[in-house]
Image (cartoon, rainbow, N blue to C red):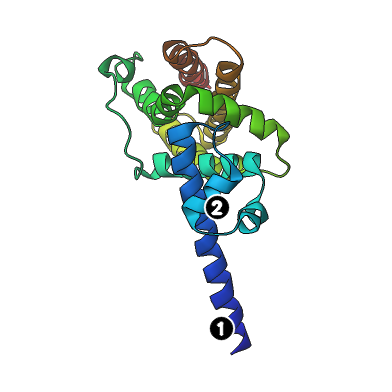
Amino acid sequence: MVSEHVQSRSGKRQKTEDRIIGAAAELFLKHGFKATTIRAIARAAEVSVGRVMSVGDKDVILVRCFDRWIGQLQNGTYTASPRRGSLSQRGSSSVQRHLLELFLPFLEFFAEHEDLSRDYAAAMMRVRGEPEVFNTLAVDLQSRLSESLVSIGINEGHARASAAALYDSYLGILFRWAATTMSLDDAVEAMLASIVFHTRVRGSL
C-alpha cells in the first residue's frame, strides 16, 4: 500500500512537471525567453509560482523545453515547418544525404527560433547538471549515425568514434551559430563538411 501511494504521488508530480514544461514551451515559442515570466508559466500551467520554481529557474526550464523539442524532433512527433528542398539535396552520396537528413530537423528548428536558440545556448552554460541532449538523446542519435556509417563498410569501432565526432560537431555548430551571424545555409554546409570527412576518410580504414 505504501509503495502504491508513493508511486501515485510520484506519477502526479511528474504529470504536473510535464504540464509546467508544456506551458513554458508554448510561452517561449510565442513570446520568447526574456518576455516569459515564471508567473506567466504558473498561470498557464494552473499551478503556483512556487511549484514552477520547484522545477527550476527559467534557464533550467528552457533547457528542459529544448530537451522535449529535440526528443520530439528525433522521434518524429514534432510538427515542423515545410523544408526547403535544396537543403536535403546536398551531399554527393546517398549516405551523406541520409546523415545530413538526421541533423536537418534540429538545424531547421534552431533557424526558425533563432533568438530562443541563442538564449538556450547561454542557458546551457549556466545550468548545472547534464541536460538530456548530452545523455539519452545523444545516445539515440549517435546510434543511428553509427548504423549508417557501418552500412557503407566502416568498421563498428570507427563508426562509433565518427558518430560521436559528428554529434560533437553538431553541438559545436549550434554554439557557434548562437554566438555569430552564421546562417542556416552556413550551418548546413559546416555539418555537411564534417559528414563528408567522416564518410570519406574513415571509409578506407
Secondary structure beneath label 1: helix
Q: How much space separates mark 1 and mark 2, taking CA atoms?
A: 28 Å
In the rendering, at what x and y percent does residue 178 appear? 58, 19
Instruction: Give the number of the mark in front: 1 or 2.
Output: 2
The one of 28 and 153 positioned closer to us in this rendering: 28
In the rendering, at what x and y percent does residue 60 appear? 64, 43
Could you tell me which residue is drawn at 54 percent across and 63 percent down? 14
The one of 79 and 97 positioned closer to us in this rendering: 79
Kindly identify the amino acid type of the residue bearing the numbered disc 1: Glu
Could you tell me which residue is drawn at 27 percent across and 27 percent down? 82
Secondary structure beneath label 2: helix
The image shows residue 123, relative to residue 115, as above or below, that is below
Residue 183 showing in the rendered view = yes
Kindly identify the amino acid type of the residue bearing the numbered disc 2: Ala
Could you tell me which residue is drawn at 44 percent across and 39 percent down? 144
Residue 170 position by quadrant: top right
Q: Which mark is residue 42?
A: 2
The image shows residue 167, relative to residue 144, as above or below, that is above
Compared across the picture, whether 88 is left or right of 25 comes to left
The residue indicated by pointer 1 is: 4
Q: Which mark is residue 200?
A: none
Quarter of the rendering occupied by the N terminus: bottom right
The one of 119 and 169 positioned closer to us in this rendering: 119
In the rendering, at what x and y percent does residue 101 appear? 36, 27
Compared across the picture, whether 103 is left or right of 17 comes to left
Local crowd size for mark 2, using a 10 Å CA cut-off: few (<14), some (14–19), many (≥20): many
The one of 170 and 23 positioned closer to us in this rendering: 23
In the rendering, at what x and y percent does residue 80 appear? 33, 33
The image shows residue 58, relative to residue 11, as above or below, that is above
Compared across the picture, whether 45 is left or right of 48 comes to left
